[in-house]
Amino acid sequence: QVQLVESGGGLVQTGGSLRLSCTYSGSIATITALGWFRQAPGKQRELVASISGTGTPTYTDSVKGRFAISRDNAKKTVDLQMMNLKPEDTAIYYCNAYRMRASANYWGQGTQVTVSS
């Protein structure tokens, strides 16, 4: 099992910045990748960014150049720095841990990000 706790959401104006943080615990040695997903009202949950065990990041096209994902294995955190935020970034953001051997996904409780125009 993996436990995830997010923090850092909030309300920001268009063009502003926010930093989300997720602390993970549990069976962390078997985590294949960590990531951030988001779900806007009426839409499916989508992958925003992920980072592999070796630190390789991937991003969905809509956030490339604006968001940056990072992980600190010593602190057991994965952060998402979000810059130049747009109203379409408004969503609940979820931290995710994926364990490939178990084909299992673990989720945090979610944190609301609202970008006002």
Image (cartoon, rainbow, N blue to C red):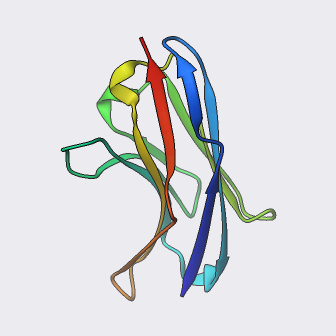
Residue extending farthest right: 74
Residue at x 62%, y 30% (from the top left corner): 18
Quarter of image, res 100? bottom left
The answer to whether residue 83 is visible is no
Residue at x 64%, y 36% (from the top left corner): 19
Residue at x 33%, y 25% (from the top left corner): 88
Front-lying residue, 42 or 54: 42
Q: Position of residue 76 (x, y in %)?
A: 73, 65
Q: Quadrant of the C terminus?
A: top left
Q: Is residue 30 above or below residue 89?
A: below
Q: Is residue 19 left or right of residue 61?
A: right
Q: Position of residue 25 (x, y in %)?
A: 67, 77
Q: Position of residue 77 (x, y in %)?
A: 70, 59
Residue at x 58%, y 16% (from the top left corner): 16
Q: Is residue 31 above or below residue 11?
A: below
Q: Quadrant of the N terminus?
A: bottom right
Q: Is residue 21 above or below residue 13?
A: below
The answer to whether residue 77 is visible is yes
Q: Is residue 79 left or right of residue 37?
A: right
Q: Position of residue 80 (x, y in %)?
A: 58, 41
Front-lying residue, 22 or 65: 22
